[in-house]
Image (spheres, rainbow, N blue to C red):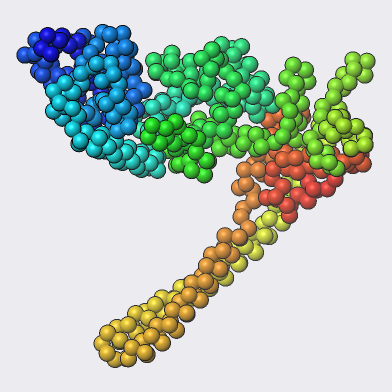
Amino acid sequence: MKNILFNVAEYIRLSREDGDKAESDSIGNQKKLITDYLKDKDDFVLYDTYIDDGFTGTNFNRPSFKRMIADIEAGKVNCVIVKDLSRFGRDYIDTGKYLERYFPDHEVRFISITDHIDSMKQAYDMLLPIKNIFNEQYARDISKKVHASMKTKQRAGEFIGAFASYGYKKSPADKNKLVIDEYAAGVIRKIFKLYIAGNGKIRIASILNEEGIVCPSEYKKLNGDHYRNSNRLDSTSYWTYSTVNRILQNEMYIGNMVQNKKSQRMRGKSKAQDKEDWIIVKGTHEAIIDNETWNKVQDLLKRSTRNPNLNSNMSIFAGFLKCGDCGRALTKKIGSKNNGGTVNYYCGTYVRSGRQYCTPHPIPHLVLEKIILEDLEAIMLNIDNMREVIEQNQEAAVTVKRVNENEKTRLTAELEKVRKLKKAVYEDYRSELISKDEFATYRQDYRKKEELLEKQLESIDNRQDEATPDIFDSPWIKRLLELRTIEKLDREIVVEMIHEITVYENHKIKITYNFSGEFETLFKTVYTDTENIG
């Protein structure tokens, strides 16, 4: 046996995620231990060193380990040396297969220095499977602790991902905080602006590609990040529908930390989490998109609408027109050049399936635009006339508030008195001035009074919350006043002001504004059907 020359593969592994300690299990420490072991052994020749730094021991899908096995298969290596068994692997089943089947079949000697295992000197002892099981259980325990620690950080709003969302980068001062990447943030703002303007997601992707803006994965690579998107084809290095779609729905851009979107069990593939299991912490970093823009986009995303034709006469009403009978969205049709190329809208059911399913409900674009402009102008003119009504409402609200405050003061004093009496009864009982039965009776009576007073106070608080606010402080009123001089509708005004336009066959439409519910008592004309649309 002494005449055998062993070509040695020293195998070294380090994974901080499975709980390895930097000092005792460092790469340098493992290498030094193996080097010292080989010093006085003439029948050992170091063939190569195989290092997997940052790879878990719970599976054998490691690049250097695979390279070592390839060298064994090629007859270049016939001895494997490790510091200890846990460096080789923590999966007791697969570890056992290598040690008890694969290495003996390939006449490979296996040495684990600190475990005092040498397959040539003695057979594996009965404790070896137990050691393997212990190593795996240790890895499982550490994995649970690591995941628990990660969840704690996530709930605290700390960023724990390897790569920040496009538009952000890790803070140089604190890797768990995000700061804005101004270039990428500019692209994000552009995407939101394009979508509000009526551009579909495919069209937005085309615009970005035409302008030579690199997609998020390529941008990260250009910045030196070793980033790989597992959902992207290797040949795809451009903006796509799905990329734009994800950006438009990503709460990270309004300053909220969104994590725990995927989970991964030990040795398993990552799995998407249900949205209710996501960990979302609000206001953890600077927003790229303001809340008003975000809300507009989310509302538009919920609408069922085709992408408008951006190459000719893009409709400012795309996604807002609905048939008053079948409920389907209206479809745009452009007339022939002989008819002046006018734009009209028709019921989508009628266009697709014919008159037997629904009637045309036609309405010209110019007529619709004229009606909405006139309606908005009427609302704006009525605002000043509403001041007297509002002021009267506010005076009534002040009176109600004064009465509520007086009642609240009286009830609070009464509640305080009851609580003192309840405390005094307990002290009388402790001093043996009253019996246990008397104490129980008094305590029950005072508890009922206390609960009743608390409910009365809660009722007053609710009434105060419902008091009439100063309506002219509303952002809707301020915005309407800003639009006094508008002469032409555009997509931005439609998105900002209108929730839905319902078109009926009898030449009537119903406009529901985004502020309709808020000012229902003030702007009743908003809800009346508009006649004479031509």
Q: Residue at 26% across / 8% down in the picture?
A: 76
Q: Residue at 36% across / 23% down in the picture?
A: 61
Relative height, residue 296 to residue 190 (above, below): below
Residue 118: give x, y in percent of width and height. 16, 24
Relative height, residue 112 to residue 347 (above, below): above
Residue 6: give x, y in percent of width and height. 17, 11
Q: How many marks?
A: 0
Snapshot quadrant of residue 351: top right
Evaluate whether residue 259 shows in this view: no
Evaluate whether residue 197 shows in this view: yes
Snapshot quadrant of residue 54: top left
Relative height, residue 363 to residue 402 (above, below): above
Q: Nearer the viewer, residue 429 or 317?
A: 429
Q: Nearer the viewer, residue 250 or 185?
A: 250
Q: Quadrant of the N terminus?
A: top left
Residue 7: give x, y in percent of width and height. 19, 10
Q: Nearer the viewer, residue 359 or 334?
A: 359
In this rendering, position of residue 214 left or right of residue 493 = left
Q: Quadrant of the C terminus?
A: top right
Relative height, residue 240 to residue 522 (above, below): above
Q: Residue at 9% across / 10% down in the picture?
A: 42
Residue 321: give x, y in percent of width and height. 78, 35
Snapshot quadrant of residue 239: top right
Find the residue positioned furthest to the left: 40
Q: Residue at 69% across / 26% down in the picture?
A: 198
